[in-house]
Amino acid sequence: MNDLRKPAGPPALEAGPARAALILIAEDHLDSRDALRALLEASGYRVLVAVDGRQALTRALEQSPDLIIMDITMPEMDGFEAICALRRHAATRLTPIIATTALEGVRPLALQAGASDFVRKPIDGRELLARVQSWLQLPLA
C-alpha cells in the first residue's frame, strides 16, 4: 500500500549532497520554479529548469539529469504526458521523477504514469529535500 521510499530522516540542510547532482525542475509557475531552484541550489544541487512538459522532455534527453521534479499541470504537454514520454526513452527510463501538484487524488495517477514519487503542493522544503536525497542515494537497477 505504501509505495513511497521513506528517507531515514530529513537531510542536514547545510551539508548538501555528496556530489553536485543535476536536478531538472519542470514547473510553469515562475514563483514556484524560483523557490524550488533556490532551495535546491542552496542545498548544493545543480539545477536545470523547464517551463512545460515538452521543454522538460527535451532538456532531460539533452542534459541527462540525475532526478526530475515534475509539475503535473503545465501547458504544451502536461506532467502525465511528459512522464510517460520520459519512460519511453532508454536514457530517462530509470531517472527518478518526483511529481508535484496541489490537485486532490492525483498521486495514484502520477505513479501509474511512471512517476517514482509524489509530493503534494504546497511543497514542504524539508520533505522535498529528504525525498530528493533518498532517490539520489538509490543504486540504479
Image (cartoon, helix red, strand yellow):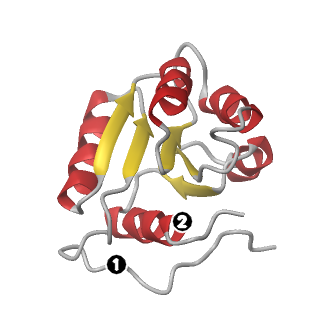
Report the amino acid beneath label 1.
Pro
Estimate the x, y position of residue 86 in percent, counting from the top left.
Answer: 66, 34
Of residues 6 and 87, the one nearer the viewer is 87
Name which quarter of the figure residue 87 lies in: top right
Residue 20 position (above or below residue 29): below
Report the amino acid beneath label 2.
Trp
Task: Say whether residue 27 is left or right of residue 47.
Answer: right
Q: CA distance from mark 2 to mark 1?
A: 12 Å
Residue at mark 2: 135
* Residue at the spot 35% in from the left edge and 29% down from the top edge: 29
Residue at mark 1: 11
Name which quarter of the figure residue 4 lies in: bottom right
* Residue at the spot 64% in from the left edge and 38% down from the top edge: 91
Of residues 102 and 140, the one nearer the viewer is 140
Estimate the x, y position of residue 97 in percent, counting from the top left.
Answer: 58, 49
Estimate the x, y position of residue 101 in percent, counting from the top left.
Answer: 53, 43
Residue 82 position (above or below residue 39): above
